[in-house]
């Protein structure tokens, strides 16, 4: 059974264009932005830039059970994967360096204007060590650092600030440890801790970001090692994180279940859009109000 037939059998929405099949990105969740090349058997997201192999698709969508007789290549891959570290096993994060051409964002008027359009002042972002690259691989992008528990720089996310038709919004450093880290200040004393998808809402709200609609076991470990065990946690993901399908529970529900095992937690179901679409005062009010309710899910009126 080929990939198209397998997706149909699992009722996973997709569209076909020539030798490509496209569907919602399994990393950032953007609808129909993951383009999978049926000849090369690899896909890439046109929004977040993430790539995915056929094996990873089968694993994510639980498609292996559809194959009655796996190919020899798949059997080899399965045997190889037995020797790979599992997500809940310790992972060593390698330290990287800032690009030489990058400088702190406060040195660039264009960065200040962009951040202002996102509701942020320069003073708010300085503690997060954001930088900007005027040229090179990261040209025209604000560089957002990902730090390990001991504050080693282990990854970089580059967000374009003046977009052209050829630019993808995000670039990531090679081997970006998305599943092992959260964005945010490790010494943050905010309570409740607000978890967002994107880094700019996290900065604005003094929270932490998951780099997308997925809270992994590695990120849970990072959170447990970063914040006070008695802290309250509020999940504030985009509206579409509450939308699932027949075969998959919405990502916000899955994250809420994980968080509930360790923290007093609430989740805010935004009526539409993302946190940027609402005022900071409204969100803070909703967060506070959510913890006065018995239900773990709060829907703003």
Image (cartoon, rainbow, N blue to C red):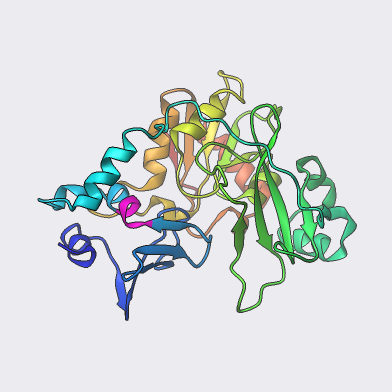
Residue 127: x, y in percent? 80, 40
**Left or right: where 192 falls relative to 118:** left
What stretch of residues is rendered in magenta? 53-57
Residue closest to the eye, 201 or 181: 181
Instruction: In the rendered view, tell whether residue 253 sits above or below residue 242.
Output: above
Can residue 63 be seen here? Answer: no
Can residue 130 be seen here? Answer: yes
Instruction: In the rendered view, tell whether residue 128 sits above or below residue 232.
Output: below
Instruction: In the rendered view, tell whether residue 107 sits above or below residue 154.
Output: below
Residue closest to the eye, 209 or 173: 173
- Rendered residue at 54%/31% (across/down): 233
Residue closest to the eye, 39 or 128: 39
**Left or right: where 273 falls relative to 63:** right
| Outermost residue, left side | 68
Q: Split into 4 quadrants, where in the image is the N terminus?
A: bottom left
- Rendered residue at 35%/48% (across/down): 250
Residue 153: x, y in percent? 70, 39
**Left or right: where 213 falls relative to 278:** left
Residue 165 included in the magenta stretch of the image:
no
Residue 55 included in the magenta stretch of the image:
yes
């Amino acid at each position: 059974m080929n990939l198209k037939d397998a997706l149909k059998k699992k009722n996973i929405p997709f569209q076909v264009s020539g030798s490509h099949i496209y569907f919602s990105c399994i990393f950032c969740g953007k609808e129909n932005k993951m383009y999978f090349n049926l000849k090369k058997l690899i896909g890439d997201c046109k929004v977040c830039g993430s790539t995915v192999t056929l094996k990873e698709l089968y694993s994510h969508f639980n498609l292996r059970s559809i194959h009655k007789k796996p190919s020899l290549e798949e059997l080899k891959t399965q045997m190889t994967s037995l020797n790979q570290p599992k997500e809940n096993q310790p992972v060593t994060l390698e330290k990287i360096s800032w690009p030489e051409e990058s400088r702190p964002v406060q040195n660039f008027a264009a960065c200040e204007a962009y951040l202002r359009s996102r509701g942020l002042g320069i003073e708010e972002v300085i503690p997060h060590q954001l930088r900007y690259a005027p040229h090179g691989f990261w040209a025209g992008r604000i560089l957002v650092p990902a730090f390990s528990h001991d504050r080693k720089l282990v990854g970089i996310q580059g967000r374009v600030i003046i977009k052209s038709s050829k630019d993808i919004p995000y670039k990531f450093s090679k081997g970006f440890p998305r599943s092992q880290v959260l964005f945010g200040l490790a010494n943050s004393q905010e309570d409740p801790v607000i978890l967002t998808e994107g880094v700019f809402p996290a900065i604005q709200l003094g929270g932490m970001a998951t780099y997308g609609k997925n809270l992994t076991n590695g990120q849970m470990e990072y959170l447990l090692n970063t914040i006070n065990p008695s802290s309250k946690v509020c999940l504030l993901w985009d509206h579409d994180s509450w939308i699932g399908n027949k075969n998959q529970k919405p990502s916000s529900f899955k994250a809420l279940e994980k968080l509930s095992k360790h923290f007093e937690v609430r989740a805010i179901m935004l009526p539409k859009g993302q946190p940027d679409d609402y005022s900071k005062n409204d969100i803070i009010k909703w967060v506070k109000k959510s913890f006065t309710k018995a239900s773990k899910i709060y829907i703003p009126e």
